Image (tube, rainbow, N blue to C red):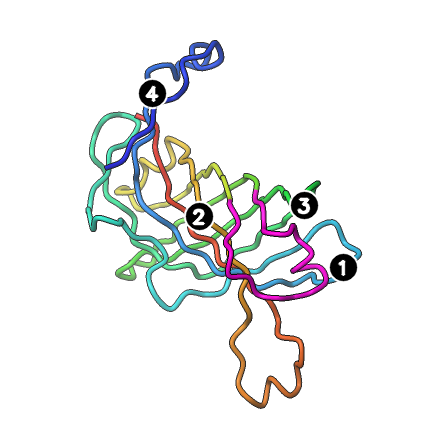
Amino acid sequence: MSTGTFDDAGWTEHWGLADKQLVYAFSLDVHYRLLVPDSSTIRLRLSAIKATECSTYHVCDEVVTPGADGALHDVPRVKIVSGDDWIDLGEAGMGVVNGVLLAQLMPGSGDQLRIEYRGVAALPRGFERLRGEGKASTVPGTAFISTRHVCNDPKFHWLEEQPLFGFGQVLIDHEPTTPGEALLKPKPECRLKLSFDLYSGV
């Protein structure tokens, strides 16, 4: 598993992070549909697209991962069922992201995992592709988030006891359409694809 050490600066000592490492926990993929395409707005609302397949995974297919307490914990296997994100547009293509996701545990147990996150994202050429052009992009942007979690399943209470830190990519793509829909919508609607690797501090 990959790790990274916090810089040994004064603030890390203050928060007790001087000797902490970030250890890979699992990955998360989310697709969002743009709901507020008005070019005059400074806030974009995104709605999560319900996933048909698993939205979380471990790149090495591990079933356990280290937590902040040093113990090994179950890796959550879930698929996104709903969620919203608000992007506050900033300077030079930067935006503050603030989202909440609901995910269904797999195999279906009836329990859900709630994921709240905040962070920043940057897109190639800024956000004009979303606000005006509505074009897809082959060049991914970057995103950095911290997450909080709520889950009734005891196996995943470890997620409630610590935040995770995510580093990932955001890609602008078009909504898939049928030929008939393409005639009605000459300008395809955009979707954002976000993919994060999430890390815990140990």
Give the label, 4 or 2, closer to the camera: 4
Give the residue pinned by disc 3: 88
How far apart are the alpha carbons under marks 3 and 4? Answer: 31 Å
In the displayed orientation, state which residue is furthest to the bottom.
Answer: 180
Q: Position of residue 138 (x, y in %)?
A: 51, 61
Give the residue pinned by disc 2: 114
Secondary structure at numbered mark 1: loop
Give the residue pinned by disc 1: 39
Q: Position of residue 165 (x, y in %)?
A: 42, 35
How far apart are the alpha carbons under marks 4 and 2? Answer: 26 Å
Secondary structure at numbered mark 4: loop
* Sequence-first tag of 1 and 2: 1
How far apart are the alpha carbons under marks 1 and 2? Answer: 31 Å
* Residues under numbered marks 2 and 3 in contact, where contact means CB atoms less than 8 Å apart: no
Q: Is residue 124 above or below residue 137?
A: above
Task: State yes or no: residue 182 in magenta.
Answer: no
Q: Position of residue 102 (x, y in %)?
A: 45, 54
How far apart are the alpha carbons under marks 1 and 3? Answer: 13 Å
Give the residue pinned by disc 4: 20
How far apart are the alpha carbons under marks 1 and 4? Answer: 43 Å
Tell me if mark 3 has few (under 14), some (14-19) or many (20+) residues whose alpha carbon lies within 10 angstroms of its own: some
In the image, the segment drawn in magenta is 121-142
